[in-house]
Image (cartoon, rainbow, N blue to C red):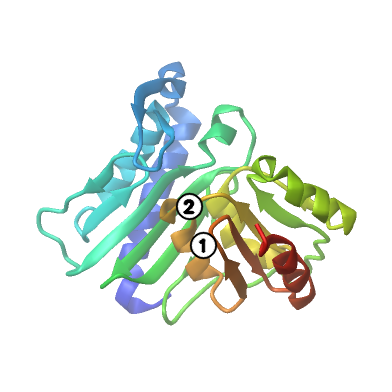
Amino acid sequence: MTKKYSQFIENVLEANGDISNYLDIALTEKDFQKVGTIGEGGDEIKVIDLIAEGFFVKSLIKFCDIFSEESGLIKSSNPILQNGIIILDPLDGSDNFLSNFPYYGTSVSLKINNKTVVGIVYNLVTNKYIYKTPNATNSLVNATLKSNFGLFERAYSAPEIVNLLNQKNIKFRSPGATALSLANSRDYLFFLLAGRAREFDVDAGIYIAKGLNIYQNNNFLLVSKDDKYFGIIKDIIKGY
């Protein structure tokens, strides 16, 4: 872990620990309710989204401003990091969480002068995380992993692409937590996202995936370690 950003990473992990503990021992029925407003990311906010955001604000606001999927820009009164901003998704896969589907987490990136220098994506189910800084990473693929499928987030919105992948016998899953899937793209044949790539969903994950094949157009984001699958899928989506 690079020393320059070690305190920031520790505080991110502290916030995730607080959220994990809350989900384990303090969750109430009220937390599942909607608050009646639309967040910065365009989704309807739930109480649990704001609770998770609050833990991050408490731990990270001293560093710099926070741009959150829920509340938008949250200003830091006395920032430690000049020209910095934190991009935050405090509960990635919140619909999964609300449905008791065990695939959800958090996504945090730190940008300095509009350049991402830290990305951390945390799995709240397994309590494992992936991070990257300019000089360190733990985002190495599991050497024993032999995945034979990719991850296609929001596949439901692109039935024509689903059909084309099926015709080529390309297998995929659509687990419903974009940041987690993107950050773990090294573990799968590919990652594909249909629709708008919101920075809350992808900023940390794209930084973590640096070095892999990446293609993006107005409607899709594709990431793959496999040159063959990258080429096939890129040819499919580039016309859409």
Residue 161 percent location from the top left of the image: 74, 51
Name the residue rendered at 31%, 58% in the picture: 86
Three-letter amino acid code at the position of disc 1: Gly
Disc 2: which residue: 201
Task: Tell me the quarter of the picture where residue 149 sits.
Answer: bottom right
Name the residue rendered at 49%, 58% in the picture: 202
Q: Is residue 231 above or below residue 20?
A: below
Judged left or right of residue 177, residue 47 is left
Q: Is residue 185 above or below residue 1?
A: above
Q: Nearer the viewer, residue 16 or 68?
A: 68
**Would you say the residues marked 1 and 2 are in contact, meaning their CB atoms lie under 8 Å apart?**
yes
**SS at mark 1?**
helix
Three-letter amino acid code at the position of disc 2: Asp
Residue 120 percent location from the top left of the image: 45, 61
Disc 1: which residue: 205
Whether residue 156 is visible, yes or no, is: yes
The Cα atoms of the two marked residues, 1 and 2, are separated by: 8 Å
Name the residue rendered at 59%, 35% in the picture: 96
**SS at mark 2?**
helix
**Residue found farthest to the top:** 29
Judged left or right of residue 138, residue 150 is right
Residue 117 percent location from the top left of the image: 37, 73
Task: Point out the image quarter for the N terminus.
Answer: bottom left
Whether residue 60 is visible, yes or no, is: no
